[in-house]
Amino acid sequence: MVRDVKKQALHALSFLVTLAVVVGVLKFMNWAPGALEPGLMSRYQGVDDVQATLGIRKIYVPAYFPETLGWPPAAILAQSKPYPAVVMEFARASDGETMLVIAQAASRSFDPEAAIRFSTVSETVALDLRGRRAQLEAGLCEDRTACSRLEWEEGDLHLTLTMKAPSVELIRIAESMLH
Amino acid sequence: MDLTNFFNSYPGVHLVQAFMHSMTAMIVADRAVRAWNISSPVVRQKFHLIAVFGPVFSYPLYQWFDPGRGSIQFRLDALFDSGRWLDVELWGVLPAVWLILVVPLATTAMFLIQELVPILRHRSGPEDPDLRPVPAIEGSPVVLAAAALAPRPPDIFVIRDDDPEIHSVTSRSPGIYVTTGLLRSLEPAELKVAIAHEIAHIRRSRMPLLVVAYVMRVLLFFSPGTLVAFRKAADEEEKICDDWAARMTGRPDALAAVLEKLRHSAVYEIEDQDPGQPLSEMERMSYDLMVRDRIRRLAEERPAPAVAGDWLKFAVTAVSILVMNYYIV
């Protein structure tokens, strides 16, 4: 009986070692591209860190923030390859929930698949944003709260702002990014 | 649409994740069979089938469970993010994705050349009219052997060929095809157990699990993990049919003798291969290993039934793969 339990324990241990080896190999394979090609998408401590490490000079940051949002960004993700892109996530100070995502990328195909996702888009309108042609979408987030998204081209960059808030607030934030 | 855009689209992500999920499932399931020391071919087959079924459904299932699984945040924390390789350029000129694509393309070529083309060629029948199968004569030893094993035995056909060979067709009108070469070389008990083995294939081919497994395998034609897992499952199928034949006839030694005779012939009966076609040296070596393993089982072991703990081990392995693949995007 004891021998049988010992045998089973050894089998379980052998299985766990298998899992550990597979996980190790996967982690190595995930690390390797970053070593081969520096500048792939990573987390950064702050805007200055992104500018210093990746050499992305122009990072659009709003001058206006609703009081409920905290500064600095809860997360900054950026890459310089295959093209420069920066994603900043801002959380609500009270509970840490992501309320605003600002993405800028040198490619229209960049899709941050951000923490804020629409469940329904009820309205899409074109609007003038300090001389730029912008597109505004309004609707509901997945948690059924008001959601809005604003996109426009700024030189070579494509900017996207997504917020869990009515569009009026989002337009105000976007305008504050364009000095 | 360039390659990167395709791999970022829903079908592209599905293909990439099915590819990766099948690889990890195949490796973990195969190692689990050894680690847990599973001896029942029925249970071993189920382990291998995880890598055949799982990858078809894993991506939509995970996305339904967690729509945020594709986000950058999730990808940065993942065990493996395939998207990182899509952006790598080796030596600044060669996109890594081109090198990576070689694997599914080679697997697709193997699927076409080794599996699909032989099936189509086999359906069209032999070119040589002398090799066309003819129904076995009523009252002949081979027909009597089949009648003794099943109340409604499948049709038996004889092929005029000196190579010793036997195989079954498991379509809507199943049949067993045996060459005159084999009929001449087998003792009555050996012939009976060989027919029993083919009857087991025909009976089991109607099991929905195996039919669906074959459909899944075809859907994932580009995935090496699925290819290997399916072939391992097919090897276990041979052992399951061996056990059934040995049980029905009580003569595992006779089945071992048949396999030994087939092993030394120029052609083999091989799953998913055109019967009668010579095998490459590599295929021959791999098939020879498998046949020797089957002979060893028949000589040394009694059929190994599933034991109570086997299904618990299967569940632990399946859940481990499910969790691990969740973090492979």
Image (cartoon, coloured by chain):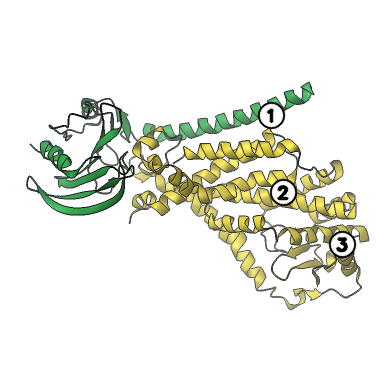
- Which colour is chain A painted? green
Quadrant holding the N terminus of chain B: bottom left
Residue at 58% x, 50% y is B53
Disc 2 crowd, CA 10 A, few/some/many (<14, 14-19, 20+)? many
Task: Report whether residue B267 is seen.
Answer: no
Q: Which residue is mark 1?
A: A11
Q: State the residue at coordinates (71%, 28%).
A: A8
Write down the chain letter for disc 2.
Answer: B
**Left or right, residue A119 beside residue B296:** left
Q: Which mark is residue B236?
A: 2
Visual hue assigned to chain B: yellow
Q: Nearer the viewer, residue B36 or B105?
A: B36
In the image, residue B296 above or below residue B121:
above
Q: Crowdedness of circle 3 by 10 Å Cα count: few (<14), some, many (20+)?
A: some
Q: Residue furthest top?
A: A2
Residue B71 appears at what percent x and percent y? 36, 40
Q: Position of residue B175 (x, y in %)?
A: 76, 68
Q: Which mark is residue B149?
A: 3
What whole-number distance in Å separates the C-alpha atoms at marks 1 and 2?
21 Å
Against A64, residue B57 (above or below) is: below
Mark 3, chain letter? B
Residue A156 lies in quadrant: top left
Which kind of residue does numbered mark 2 sit on?
Answer: Glu
For badge 3, the amino acid type reads Leu
Residue B109 in picture, x, y percent from top left: 54, 57
Labels 3 and 2 positioned on one and the same chain: yes
Q: Quadrant of residue B210?
A: bottom right
Q: Secondary structure under badge 2? A: helix
| Chain name for mark 1 | A
Quadrant including the C terminus of chain B: top left
